[in-house]
Image: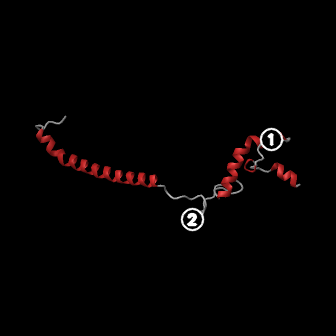
C-alpha cells in the first residue's frame, strides 16, 4: 500500500539529487517530464499560497515567510510617481483656470467672430 501511494504521489526528487536515478524506472516518464512543475507547486504549498487541493488561500498572515519589504528603488519610483501625479494635477488645474477665464475675453479680442 505504501509503495502504491508513493508511486501515485507528486514528488520533487530533483532537490535531493535523484533527478537522474529515477528516470530509468518503469512508469517514471511522467515524473521526469513534470518534475519542475511539481517542485514549483510543492514550493507554493509550503509558502502557504495554496492549499493541498490547489485552491488559493486568501487569509492574511503578517508573519508569513513570503513577505518582503519594498526595495529602495521601488520606494523612489513610488515617490516620483506620486509627486508627478500631484504636479500634473496642479498644472491641469492652472490650465483649466486659464481656459475658463480667457474664454469670454478671447472672443472680444478677436472682434467678436467665432470660428
Q: Residues within 10 Å of mark 1 (few under 14, many from 20)?
A: some
Residue located at (15% from left, 42% from top): 106
- In the image, residue 40 sits, relative to residue 33, either above or below, namely below
Q: In the shown orientation, is residue 32 left or right of residue 92?
A: right
Judge by depth and name the residue closer to the eye, 42 or 19: 19
Residue located at (39% from left, 51% from top): 81
Q: Position of residue 9 (x, y in %)?
A: 79, 51
The quarter of the picture where residue 21 lies is top right
Label 2, secondary structure: give it.
Answer: loop
Q: Residues within 10 Å of mark 2 (few under 14, many from 20)?
A: few
Label 1, secondary structure: give it.
Answer: helix
Q: Position of residue 93 (x, y in %)?
A: 27, 51
Judge by depth and name the residue closer to the eye, 18 or 58: 18
Position of the N terminus, as image quadrant, is bottom right
Residue receiving disc 1: 23
Q: Tell me the CA gap for discs 2 and 1.
A: 41 Å
Residue 34 seen anywhere in this rendered image of the structure: yes
Position of the C terminus, as image quadrant, is top left
Q: Earlier in the sequence, mark 2 or mark 1?
A: 1
Furthest-right residue in view? 1
Residue receiving disc 2: 62
Q: Any mark on residue 99, and which?
A: none
Judge by depth and name the residue closer to the eye, 59 or 41: 41
Q: In the shown orientation, is residue 93 left or right of residue 26?
A: left
Residue 54 seen anywhere in this rendered image of the structure: no
Q: Position of residue 7 (x, y in %)?
A: 83, 49
Residue located at (14% from left, 36% from top): 113
Q: In the shown orientation, is residue 59 left or right of residue 15?
A: left
Q: In the shown orientation, is residue 81 left or right of residue 34?
A: left
Q: Position of residue 108 (x, y in %)?
A: 11, 41
- In the image, residue 20 sits, relative to residue 66, either above or below, namely above
Amino acid at each position: 500500500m505504501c509503495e502504491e501511494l508513493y508511486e501515485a504521489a507528486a514528488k520533487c526528487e530533483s532537490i535531493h539529487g535523484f533527478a537522474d536515478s529515477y528516470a530509468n524506472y518503469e512508469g517514471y516518464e511522467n515524473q521526469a517530464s513534470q518534475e519542475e512543475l511539481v517542485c514549483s507547486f510543492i514550493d507554493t504549498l509550503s509558502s502557504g499560497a495554496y492549499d493541498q487541493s490547489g485552491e488559493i488561500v486568501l487569509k492574511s498572515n503578517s508573519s508569513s515567510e513570503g513577505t518582503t519589504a519594498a526595495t529602495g528603488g521601488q520606494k523612489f519610483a513610488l515617490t516620483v510617481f506620486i509627486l508627478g501625479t500631484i504636479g500634473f494635477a496642479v498644472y491641469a488645474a492652472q490650465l483649466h483656470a486659464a481656459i475658463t477665464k480667457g474664454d469670454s475675453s478671447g472672443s472680444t479680442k478677436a472682434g467678436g467672430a467665432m470660428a
